[in-house]
């Protein structure tokens, strides 16, 4: 029984070996068949970002046979000739990426970047070289957006550099041989300009802080297109000082230490502060008379000065300044002391001339009344005296006979107590009555 089992074991073992042998043959045949119809896909890093030619070669060497027409993405504006056409996407059987094995006949589509249709290779440019020749070559290559930027140099000592190209930029890229560039990119050519009409902007001019010195300096150097731009400034201390210097619409840094070379006819605009249209309100004007205030404002530079009187009955205020208005507002020394010269200055003052005239009129009336009263009193006294003398004469005539009386002059008449002597009285004579009013020795 044991032997039988062993034999069975041997038979089973042999059977198993045969089975295994048969199975193994099928497996080998299957693997060989698969190897004949499949291939190993390359790793992603082997193809992505690599030149299309290299990637195509990799897939062909791997055994893939159904590589569809690749999609060209013509969007590269710059790049190295032998490194262009970089792979962007690989589709294996419609999927963006697969790894491992795949049928050799699986459809493979490759999208890659390529130079733009207007891209050109610039291998034979005259660079570095003459700027005119280089510009001509760029135009012939198809570039139409070309900027020429000069680096200004003085002619002395730089003859060999004049019109020589210093740098060439196409778009954001510095020019290199063996690279392609899209003609739609802007081109900037930097070259040296050492022509004889180049002048050095004087360093002392940048350090100069006032218009007079700067104007003298620029004139001596020889610049011909200098324009002065006056900026009105109320701060008198800034008068004539430089605010900024603009060259070809670009402001210069006044503190720069670099040499600045410009064309002789370069437009230069210099802005400076100017106080000339302003004037300062004179001091000590509050207590001055109207005429004195007018003199002070005129001397200060104000051009529109007037006066306005305000009537008052207070004679003590006559002629005194009440307020000074500048441009319609009462001047306040605590707020502002500088105004435009053409500001309207109005000096208002008190006028009591009518009150003074009225007072004079009343005083004259009083004087005339007093004079009339005095005259009336004198006349009354004279009449009374005349009446008394007349009575005395009558009385004398009654007591004594008439006699011839003669007074050689008024002194004698007064000595005799006869003055005044009336016409008809003894002693009266025309030589005593000079005004002929009938009364002598008045």
Image (tube, rainbow, N blue to C red):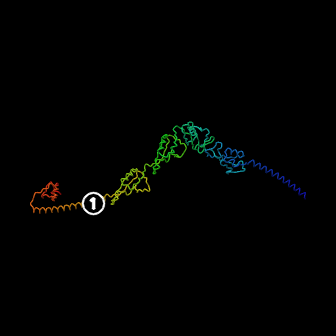
Using the rendered view, name the quadrant where residue 54 is placed. top right
Q: Tell whether 14 sits left or right of 354.
A: right
Using the rendered view, name the quadrant where residue 382 is placed. bottom left
Using the rendered view, name the quadrant where residue 329 is placed. bottom left
Point out the residue furthest to the left here: 401
Point out the residue furthest to the top here: 160
Which residue is more in the foreground, 279 or 48?
279
Q: Secondary structure at mark 1?
A: helix
Which residue is more in the foreground, 181 or 269?
269
Q: Tell whether 97 sits left or right of 198.
A: right
**With respect to residue 255, does 327 lie above or below?**
below
Q: Quadrant of the N terminus?
A: bottom right
Residue at x 27%, y 60% (from the top left corner):
363
Q: Where in the figure is residue 3, as x and y percent of width and height? A: 90, 57
Q: Where in the figure is residue 248, as x and y percent of width and height? A: 51, 44
Q: Where in the figure is residue 351, as x and y percent of width and height? A: 33, 57
Q: Quadrant of the C terminus?
A: bottom left
Q: Residues within 10 Å of mark 1 (few under 14, many from 20)?
A: few
Q: Where in the figure is residue 221, as x and y percent of width and height? A: 49, 40
Which residue is more in the foreground, 325 or 158?
325
Which residue is more in the foreground, 135 or 54?
135
Q: Tell whether 136 sits left or right of 419.
A: right
**Residue holding disc 1:** 363
């Amino acid at each position: 029984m044991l032997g039988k089992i062993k034999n069975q074991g041997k038979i089973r073992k042999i059977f198993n070996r045969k089975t295994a042998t048969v199975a193994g043959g099928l497996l080998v045949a299957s693997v060989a068949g698969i190897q004949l119809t499949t291939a190993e896909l390359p790793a992603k890093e082997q193809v992505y970002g690599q030149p299309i030619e290299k990637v195509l070669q990799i897939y062909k060497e791997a055994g893939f046979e159904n590589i569809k027409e690749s999609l060209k993405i013509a969007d590269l504006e710059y790049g190295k000739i032998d490194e262009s056409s970089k792979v962007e996407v690989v589709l294996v059987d419609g999927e963006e990426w697969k790894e491992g094995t795949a049928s050799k006949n699986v459809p493979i589509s490759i999208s890659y970047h390529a130079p733009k249709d207007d891209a050109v290779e610039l291998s034979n440019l005259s660079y570095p070289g003459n700027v005119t020749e280089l510009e001509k070559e760029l135009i012939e290559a198809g570039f139409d957006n070309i900027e020429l930027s000069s680096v200004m140099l003085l002619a002395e000592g730089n003859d060999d550099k004049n019109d020589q190209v210093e740098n060439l930029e196409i778009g954001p890229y510095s020019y290199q041989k063996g690279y392609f560039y899209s003609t739609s990119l802007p081109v900037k050519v930097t070259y040296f300009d050492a022509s004889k009409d180049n002048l050095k902007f004087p360093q002392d001019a940048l350090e100069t802080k006032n218009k007079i010195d700067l104007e003298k300096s620029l004139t001596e150097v020889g610049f011909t297109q200098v324009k002065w731009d006056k900026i009105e400034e109320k701060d008198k201390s800034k008068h004539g000082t430089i605010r900024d210097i603009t060259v070809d619409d670009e402001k210069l840094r006044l503190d720069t230490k670099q040499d600045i070379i410009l064309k002789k006819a370069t437009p230069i605009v210099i802005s400076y502060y100017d106080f000339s249209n302003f004037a300062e309100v004179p001091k000590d004007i509050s207590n001055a008379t109207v005429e004195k205030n007018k003199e002070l404002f005129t001397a200060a530079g104000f051009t529109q000065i007037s006066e306005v009187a305000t009537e008052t009955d207070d004679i003590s205020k006559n002629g005194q300044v009440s307020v000074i208005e500048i441009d319609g507002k009462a001047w306040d020394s605590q707020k502002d002391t500088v105004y435009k010269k053409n500001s309207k200055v109005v000096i208002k003052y008190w006028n009591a001339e009518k009150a003074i005239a009225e007072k004079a009129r009343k005083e004259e009336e009083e004087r005339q009344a007093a004079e009339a009263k005095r005259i009336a009193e004198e006349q009354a006294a004279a009449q009374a005296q005349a009446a008394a003398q007349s009575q005395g004469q009558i009385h004398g005539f009654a007591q004594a006979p008439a006699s011839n009386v003669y007074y050689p002059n008024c002194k004698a008449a007064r000595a005799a107590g006869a003055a005044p002597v009336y016409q008809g009285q003894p002693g009266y004579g025309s030589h005593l009555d000079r005004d002929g009013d009938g009364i002598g020795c008045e």
